[in-house]
Image (cartoon, rainbow, N blue to C red):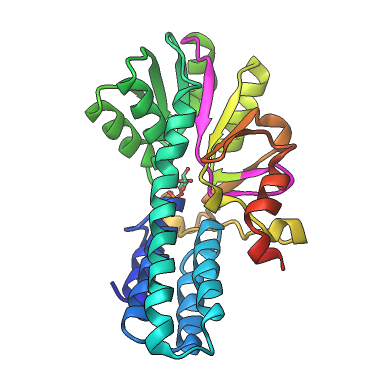
């Protein structure tokens, strides 16, 4: 797929989910390299892809890593350098794709028989964790918030139902009542960006669900591949919280509508962060970022 097509699909959310947009961007750049693009034109393509959506750091992380690989070969003979670069990029894409399965393997260890789990939005990573736990024979049930305004909770409910997981869809405003009356034992959410401070940016409503969990003394588990960790946050940068069109919420002429797509969950409201490297905490996450993103922090 061309860079412009990939960027358009990310922008329209035809390609969505923080991991999927990272993989799509890396693949579009890989295609450009195959087509013989110069380093300068790769930089321009990186800008187009980066501008497609602002909040998930997985997108710039993947683009910047491919550009970092390309820069290492910038002055080499293309006939020699291009195959080496393509091998490195393809290896990187495979690692991105397999990181989700590693999170699933590790995260499924935290699902227990009898669990009642509350989730929000549609995180492929959370769905993979739950599917893996189900395959292991664990008996648990899931409540999925519908996730206004785009209703990605429906995708989660359908995916879990198709896998045989006991799932119930609820409206977002039923989260507290459901957690209390249905004996929710833990909250499991995905991530678009994780700061070194331990704050987690995820679909709008996640911070409310985490506050509910805190009120009820429930653990909040964040399932995230390391591609969603922000090295730039260690340098003081923050991501822009995407505001989407008001028509996603309602068509009410003359009524002002505020439609933020993401929110920031406080570090103190998060219990555990599950990555492909194991279990960690908001307090420890900056160490992992420093270790895995040394290339970006130079
Ligand atoms: P996975 C999604 O954003 C949701 O906020 C989800 O929790 C997060 O990305 C991570 O998704 P959007 O693209 O990578 O729906 O786990 O706006 O699939």
Residue 122 location (% of width, % of height): 40, 40
Residue 254 location (% of width, % of height): 49, 58
Count the labels in the image: 0
The residue at the point 72 percent across, 47 percent down is: 286
Name the side, left or right, on which 132 lies relative to 52: left
Residue 30 location (% of width, % of height): 37, 72
Magenta residues, dominant SS class: loop
Q: Which residues are magenta?
A: 182-200
Q: Is residue 46 magenta?
A: no
Q: Could you tell me which quadrant the C terminus lies in?
A: bottom right
Q: Residue 158's quadrant in the figure?
A: top left
Residues 131 and 98: in front is: 98
Q: Residue furthest left?
A: 162
Name the side, left or right, on which 220 lies relative to 181: right
Residues 244 and 12: in front is: 12
Residue 8, relative to residue 14: is it above or below? below
Q: Could you tell me which quadrant the N terminus lies in?
A: bottom left
Q: Is residue 196 magenta?
A: yes
Q: Residue 251's quadrant in the figure?
A: bottom left
The residue at the point 44 percent across, 25 percent down is: 108
Residue 274 in sight here: yes
């Amino acid at each position: 797929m061309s860079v412009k097509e990939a960027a358009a699909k990310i922008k329209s959310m035809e390609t969505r989910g923080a991991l999927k947009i990272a993989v799509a961007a890396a693949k579009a750049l890989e295609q450009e390299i195959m087509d013989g693009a110069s380093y300068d034109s790769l930089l321009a393509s990186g800008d187009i892809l980066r501008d497609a959506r602002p909040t998930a750091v997985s997108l710039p992380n993947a683009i910047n890593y491919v550009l970092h690989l390309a820069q290492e070969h910038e002055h080499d003979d293309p006939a020699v350098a291009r195959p080496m670069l393509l091998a490195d990029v393809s290896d990187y894409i495979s690692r991105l794709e397999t990181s989700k399965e590693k999170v699933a393997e590790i995260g499924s260890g935290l699902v227990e028989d009898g669990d009642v789990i509350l989730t929000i939005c549609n995180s492929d990573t959370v769905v993979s964790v739950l599917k893996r736990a189900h395959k292991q024979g664990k008996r648990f049930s899931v409540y999925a918030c519908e996730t206004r305004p785009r209703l990605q909770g429906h995708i989660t409910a359908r995916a879990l139902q198709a896998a045989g997981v006991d799932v119930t869809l609820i409206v977002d405003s039923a989260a507290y009542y459901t957690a209390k009356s249905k004996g929710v034992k833990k909250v499991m959410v995905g991530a678009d960006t994780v700061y070194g401070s331990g704050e987690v940016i995820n679909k709008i409503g996640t911070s409310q669900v985490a506050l509910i969990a805190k009120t009820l003394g429930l653990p909040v588990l964040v399932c995230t591949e390391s591609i969603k960790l922000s090295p730039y946050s260690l340098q003081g940068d923050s991501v822009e919280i995407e505001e989407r069109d008001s028509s996603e919420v309602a068509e009410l002429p003359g009524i002002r509508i505020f439609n933020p797509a993401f929110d920031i969950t406080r570090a103190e409201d998060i219990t555990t962060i599950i990555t492909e490297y194991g279990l960690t905490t908001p307090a420890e996450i900056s160490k992992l970022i420093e270790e895995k993103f040394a290339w970006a922090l130079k």
